[in-house]
Image (cartoon, coloured by chain):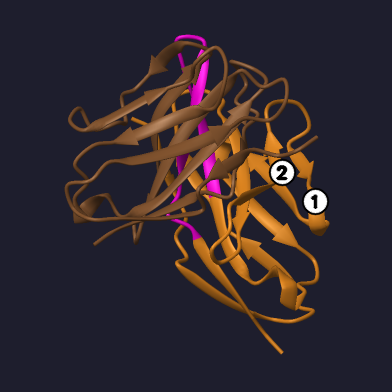
Amino acid sequence: NAGVMQNPRHLVRRRGQEARLRCSPMKGHSHVYWYRQLPEEGLKFMVYLQKENIIDESGMPKERFSAEFPKEGPSILRIQQVVRGDSAAYFCASSPYRDPPDAFFGQGTRLTVV
Amino acid sequence: AQSVTQPDIHITVSEGASLELRCNYSYGATPYLFWYVQSPGQGLQLLLKYFSGDTLVQGIKGFEAEFKRSQSSFNLRKPSVHWSDAAEYFCAVGRLNSGYSTLTFGKGTMLLVSP
């Protein structure tokens, strides 16, 4: 059973470009969470999705950020018009349950904005 | 709002010595508690978790943690540290909200292992 797969592992974007981060959950997991790790700040919750639904996006910036988890295919975290402050590691986790959060994390995507 | 405190930013332990990493949380109910480990440039690996029941939890790689409700703590322990344990360790609390939970993380403790 493959783990949570994230790609790309590293992504470099110029300011103003779009970044698309992909996450394929573990087989049988229908709950996906995105977290962001900024230097010196630790990991912060961004968004929680179930298939085709956003359940909680309270940690996601209102502007430029969006997330989806379609019926088929991976979950996508999309950042439009990236700025230097978006440089961070973005981690996806998946869980087979809504509760408790038995979350397994991917290797992360390290976004660098130049 | 709930919070997680890991009071030690860095800890250095000699190889073969015992280890205890501290974690305190604030939360209004019995939380879900986790310890994760992250090696440089890698993702987070779950070491152990507490949902309910026995307050002493055994995890992978010889780690254990004890939930102490009276102290709001969930400290991670290992009796004998190996050089390969050098990494960053994160304590996390599961916050129950309308039937689902998301995780709040501490800022991490970097473990250095000296020969």
Residue B71 in view (yes/no): no
Q: How many marks?
A: 2
Mark 2 highlights which residue?
Answer: B48
The percent position of residue B29, horizontal first and vertical second, equals 50, 22
At 17% across and 30% down in the image, what residue appears?
A63
Residue B110 pos. (x, y %): 53, 68
Q: Amino acid at mark 2?
A: Leu
Q: Residue at 55% across / 12% down in the picture? A: A71
Screen quadrant of the C terminus of chain B: bottom right
The answer to if B107 sits in the magenta stretch is yes
Please rate how many residues cluster around mark 1, counting C-alpha atoms within 10 Å: few if below 14, some from 14 to 19, many from 20.
Answer: few
Residue at the location (18% across, 53% down)? A15
Q: Is residue B21 above or below residue A26?
A: below
Q: Which chain is tinted brown?
A: A
Labels 1 and 2 within one chain: yes
Q: Is residue A52 above or below residue A16?
A: above
Where is residue A90 shown, x and y percent of the image?
43, 46
Query: Which residues make up the magenta segment?
Result: B91-108
- Tag 1's secondary structure? helix
Please say whether residue A51 is one of the residues in the magenta stretch. no
**Which chain is depicted orange?**
B
| Quadrant position of residue A18 | top left
Which corner quadrant holds the N terminus of chain B? top left
> Residue B35 or B18: which is nearer the viewer?
B35
Q: Tag 2: Cα neighbours inside 10 Å, few (<14), some, or many (≥20)?
A: some
Label located before the other in sequence (1 or 2): 2
Q: Chain of mark 1?
A: B
Q: Evaluate whether residue A33 shows in this view.
A: yes
Instruction: For the residues labelled 1 and 2, say whether their Cβ atoms are less than 8 Å apart.
Output: yes
Label ID, residue B60: 1
